[in-house]
Amino acid sequence: KYGIKNFMFLNSTINPKESFARDLANNIIKSGIDIKWCDCANFKGMNYKLLDILKKSGCMKLVFGLETASKRLQKRINKEIDLDHVEKIIRYYHKIGILANITLLCGLPYETYEDIYETLLFIKKNYKYLSGINLNRFIMKWGSDFKLNPEKHGLVIKKVRNYYTSVGFDEVDGLKWEERWD
């Protein structure tokens, strides 16, 4: 009606289940609407067949929350990702013309220079297949396991006052909040 052809969906992930993403894409295709769109996605469950359907439905870009390429930190934040699969997916995106962005987190609890280096190596190896990299600060979420069970993660929660958050943390065996923030 208004001639709008570009959409940015704001799902936390378009593919919580492959069937959701596939059904959405197939419904866009069946409806005959000619749109271009982007959304956030998860590497788990993403495959070539799904990517082809998403592309056919008008998908132009997907943003993935990789967070870190460090296996140690992935385990610590309960987000273990098969990096070989990630590489295959972003290379296929590049091949079929879907832009792939990744989102990284800095300042994760107990993050070390070695963890950062692992992520930088991943970027160096794959940068030509990525259309963008979003870098965000790790912010303690109120309902997260880090906040609910800080002792399990070796953290001491503290109230802080800055522009981004009111919840900070000291690492029991690591950096204090002020050092981490700097």
Image (tube, helix red, strand yellow):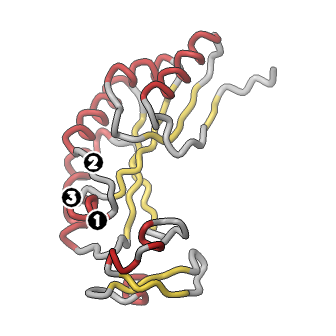
Residue occupying the point 26% across, 60% down: 75
Residue occupying the point 49% across, 41% down: 13
Residue behind mark 1:
76
The amino acid type of the residue labelled 2 equals Ile
Quadrant in which the N terminus appears = top right
Task: Count residues near mark 2 (Cα–Cα under 10 Å), then give few for <14, some for 14-19, many for 20+.
Answer: some
Numbered disc in front, either 2 or 1: 1
Percent position (x, y) of residue 51?
39, 24
**Quadrant location of residue 10?**
top right
Percent position (x, y) of residue 180?
38, 83
Residue occupying the point 39% across, 26% down: 97
Label 1: element kind: helix
Label 3: element kind: helix
Q: Nearer the viewer, residue 151 or 125?
A: 151
Residue behind mark 2:
81
Identify the mark nearer the N-term, 1 or 3.
Answer: 3
Percent position (x, y) of residue 113?
22, 73
